[in-house]
């Protein structure tokens, strides 16, 4: 057990990232137990991507050379600690550290350095500007810009420039007559924010995408620029590589709890005692797990991605297509492969104790819808699939961002419910502004604060895929 003084950021559950900041001048301490977890025991998440194998190879590269990835020693002192080194944690680490690389220390604690079950690696990698909430549009639009300039942001001396393999095919959302009005409203708002979204009538849809069966469809909204999909692993790796070059320390360990200390002060003229966060407890396999005390309405929800083969399916120009019932597909590579899926209904939520894939769900819920919308898909062949966890905000399926209402040195950045990969770069920047400047300088995310749950206010995103 080590006694340490720290500033820290935390990811307290599988699906949420919590950011802690404990000012070193408060003489905070952290108790750390170095993790000796055997990663071979973590079940791989799916067959198709062989995530485990891919990541193992990547990690081998990291270990052997350029990334100099994980440190086994948890440092004695750090100014900031990010818990969870997935895409959100790594983006936050990047934006904080690039602001002043020598100004403070920053540590990322990651329990699974090969990211076997990290959502970022198991996502579909989609990026779209078509959301119903303006901030979500802005967040994703910023990521597009970030990816456009990725070489300036994330290049590292003596390394190849990062390439996240952005496919600029756009998103296509299909709407039935009863949804047409809300689609038009959304598109208007998206355009006002500068997104290049086209509203397509049924006639235009059939001209542009002749492989679609448009029965029951009134119109579609189509992203002309900046939307598509990219390889999330390459982006995480690029963030990580850059972070390490900036002096961020990635350490292996699992944060399992926090310690508090009592602070005496005067509030509204009366002596008060309040608890202040002072330490993070990092798990050693030998130590019993403790429950965290911070409750968030965020939980893991299992989502399947299926890989199908259909040589006669839509061609290279096919967008990331979302049917009116949210069944989606997109091309995967160039050999007639596609990935597809849909969120289960509330009463169908799968068990989350494993990442096993339910292929019956594909046959019952996904394929019929795909085949009726794209007749060529009647001939598709199932190849494989994988599962991952959405960090699901059970209240309003949206970001939870900013300061904890009670613990002022604790910050949230989680709950994105399926759109975190495409917003991570912007969320990282927002956290840097919020923590270092004390305010939002670019995109105002104040509506996403934790406090909305205390006041029963919700921000419902209509376009959850
Ligand atoms: C099937 C699927 C499809 C998706 N498709 C898309 C998409 O098309 N577009 C999009 O934008 N988003 C998509 N998402 C959502 C996206 O993947 C997530 O929003 C995003 O990856 C969240 O990033 P994260 O860094 O918070 O989580 P993660 O990538 O899960 O990273 C969190 C990390 O924290 C570590 N950790 C957790 N707890 C602790 C602890 N206590 N101590 C130490 N380390 C800890 C974990 O090991 C993990 O590596 C999809 C998700 C899934 C599952």
Image: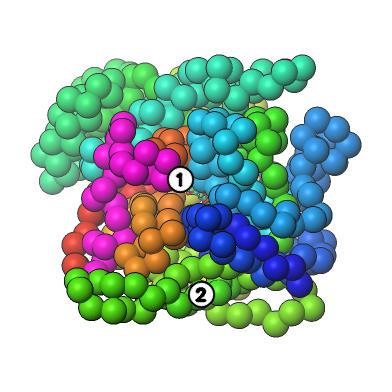
x and y percent of residue 42 in the render?
Answer: 74, 64
Viewer-closest of 42 and 150 = 150
As rendered, which of 395 and 2 lies closer to the eye? 2
Q: Residue at x 19, y 71 (%)?
A: 268
Q: Secondary structure at mark 1?
A: loop
State the image coordinates of residue 279 (x, y, percent, origin top left): 58, 67
Q: Residue at x 31, y 39 (%)?
A: 440
Left or right of 148, for residue 217: left
Question: Secondary structure under badge 2?
Answer: strand
Residue 107 falls inside the magenta stretch: no
Identify which residue is drawn at 58% across, 41% down: 104
Disc number for residue 420: 1
Give percent across and percent down for residue 198.
Answer: 24, 22
Image quadrant of residue 441?
top left
Residue 59 in sight here: yes
Q: For residue 448: magenta?
A: yes
- Residue range highlighted in magenta: 434-454
Category of crowding for the residue at label 2, using alpha-carbon neighbours closer than 10 angstroms: few (below 14), some (14–19), many (at least 20): some
- The residue shown at (25%, 22%) is 194
Farthest residue, direction right? 64
User: Within 10 angstroms of label 1, few (less than 14), some, or many (20 or more) residues?
Assistant: many
On the rendered structure, is 61 left or right of 224? right
Pointer 1 residue Cβ closer than 8 Å to ligand 1? yes
Which residue is labeled 2 in the image? 260
Q: Nearer the viewer, mark 1 or mark 2?
A: 2
Q: Nearer the viewer, residue 308 or 164?
A: 164
Which mark identifies residue 158?
none
């Amino acid at each position: 057990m080590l006694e340490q003084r720290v500033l820290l950021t935390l990811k307290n559950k599988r699906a949420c990232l919590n950011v802690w900041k404990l000012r070193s001048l408060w003489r905070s301490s952290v108790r750390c137990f170095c993790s000796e977890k055997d990663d071979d025991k973590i079940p791989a998440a799916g067959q198709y991507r062989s995530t485990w194998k891919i990541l193992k190879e990547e990690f081998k590269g990291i270990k052997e050379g350029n990334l100099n990835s994980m440190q086994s020693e948890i440092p004695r002192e750090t100014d900031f600690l990010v818990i969870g080194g997935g895409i959100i944690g790594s983006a936050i680490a990047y934006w904080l550290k690039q602001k002043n690389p020598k100004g403070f220390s920053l540590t990322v604690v990651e329990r699974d350095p090969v990211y076997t079950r990290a959502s970022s690696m198991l996502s579909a990698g989609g990026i779209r500007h078509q959301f119903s909430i303006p901030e979500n549009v802005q967040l994703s639009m910023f990521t597009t810009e970030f990816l456009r300039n990725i070489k300036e942001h994330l290049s590292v001396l003596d390394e190849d420039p990062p390439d996240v393999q952005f496919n600029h095919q756009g998103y296509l959302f299909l709407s039935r007559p009863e949804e047409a009005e809300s689609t038009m409203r959304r598109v208007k708002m998206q355009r006002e924010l500068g997104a290049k979204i086209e509203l397509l009538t049924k006639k235009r849809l059939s001209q542009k995408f002749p492989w679609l069966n448009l029965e029951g469809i009134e119109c579609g909204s189509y992203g002309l620029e900046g939307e598509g999909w990219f390889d999330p692993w390459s982006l995480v790796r690029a963030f990580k590589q850059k972070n390490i070059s900036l002096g961020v320390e990635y350490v292996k360990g699992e944060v399992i709890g926090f310690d508090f200390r009592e602070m005496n002060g005067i509030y509204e003229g009366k002596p008060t005692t309040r608890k202040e966060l002072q330490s993070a407890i990092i798990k050693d396999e030998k130590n019993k797990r403790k429950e965290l005390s911070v409750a968030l309405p965020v939980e893991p929800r299992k989502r399947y991605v299926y890989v199908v083969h259909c040589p006669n399916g839509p061609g290279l120009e096919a967008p990331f297509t979302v049917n009116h019932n949210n069944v989606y597909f997109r091309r995967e590579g160039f050999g007639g492969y596609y990935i597809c899926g849909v969120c289960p209904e509330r009463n169908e939520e799968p068990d989350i104790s494993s990442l096993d894939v339910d292929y019956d769900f594909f046959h019952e819920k996904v394929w019929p819808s795909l085949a009726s919308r794209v007749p060529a898909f009647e001939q598709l062949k199932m190849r494989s699939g994988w599962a991952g966890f959405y960090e699901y905000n059970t209240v309003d399926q949206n970001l939870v961002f900013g300061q904890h209402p009670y613990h002022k040195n604790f910050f949230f950045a989680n709950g994105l419910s399926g759109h975190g990969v495409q917003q991570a770069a912007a969320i990282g920047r927002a956290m840097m502004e919020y923590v270092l400047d004390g305010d939002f300088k670019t995109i105002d995310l104040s509506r996403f604060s934790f406090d909305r749950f205390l006041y029963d206010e919700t921000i419902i995103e209509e376009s959850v895929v």
